[in-house]
Image (cartoon, helix red, strand yellow):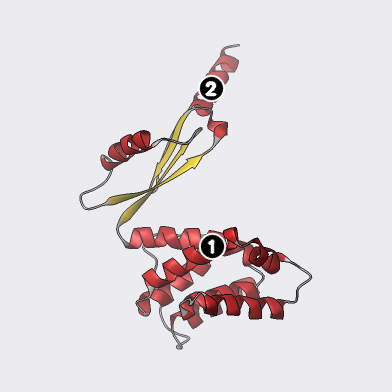
Amino acid sequence: MASRNLAVLARQFSTSSPNAVLVRTPVAVHGIDGRYASALYSAASKQKSLEAVEKDLVNFAATLKTDPRLADFLKDPSIKKSLKLDGLAGVADKMKLNPLSKNLLLSMAENNRFTFIPAVTSVFSTIMSAHRGEVVCTVTTAKALDAAMQKEVEGAMAGFLKKGEKAHITYKVDASIIGGMVVSIADKFCDMSMATKLNKYSDLLKAAA
């Protein structure tokens, strides 16, 4: 059922013609959140509303974080779906969201996919980074990097990029890696964490015992 609804959603977003070809995303995305984001990208591309939709999703996701009443309202199982849809439509109108953004949120609400809104926003941002020719990079460290260290990382990243490319870097903190860093650049991955090194040393010691 959910899969069929997503297919219908994609066609509705993209055009009134059921046989229309969807605009492919510039980067492969997967999962339910990826399919919602892809359908929205296709429709927004054809209507030249990509930047407006991207801004809408970011603003709405931020509102969910800063307005716990809205988040609780959408998650409350005791509230009827029809009331949630009406409430969500009202919020979308108040925020003056693009019709495509509003339709996406209502379609997700119809399928009880409220919790996927932040994930869809994140995936759409990734798609838009690729659309702008940016290379998506993620740097994970045990502790947050200061401005000076981030500048060094950005300089190092530049050496991996092709001419004309720009890095879109997301910094994450994960204490479990202990030290060092884990870096992903597009589809490339490099684990330089202390935790991984310790695990390798541990395996070597066990093998030698």
Q: Distance between the residues labelled 2 and 1?
A: 38 Å
Along the line of sight, which residue is nearer the eye, 51 or 198? Answer: 51
Res 160 visible: yes
| 198 is higher (above) or lower (below) than 107 | above
- For mark 1, what is the residue? 61
Q: Residues within 10 Å of mark 1 (few under 14, many from 20)?
A: some
| 130 is higher (above) or lower (below) than 12 | above
Tag 2 near tag 1, CB within 8 Å: no
Measured from the top left, where is residue 102 in percent x and y? 52, 77
Circle 1 SS class: helix
Measured from the top left, where is residue 85 in percent x and y? 65, 78
- The residue at the far top in this view is 209
Q: How crowded is mark 2: few (under 14 residues within 10 Å), some or many (20 or more)?
A: few
- For mark 2, what is the residue? 198
Res 103 visible: no
- The residue at the far right in this view is 78
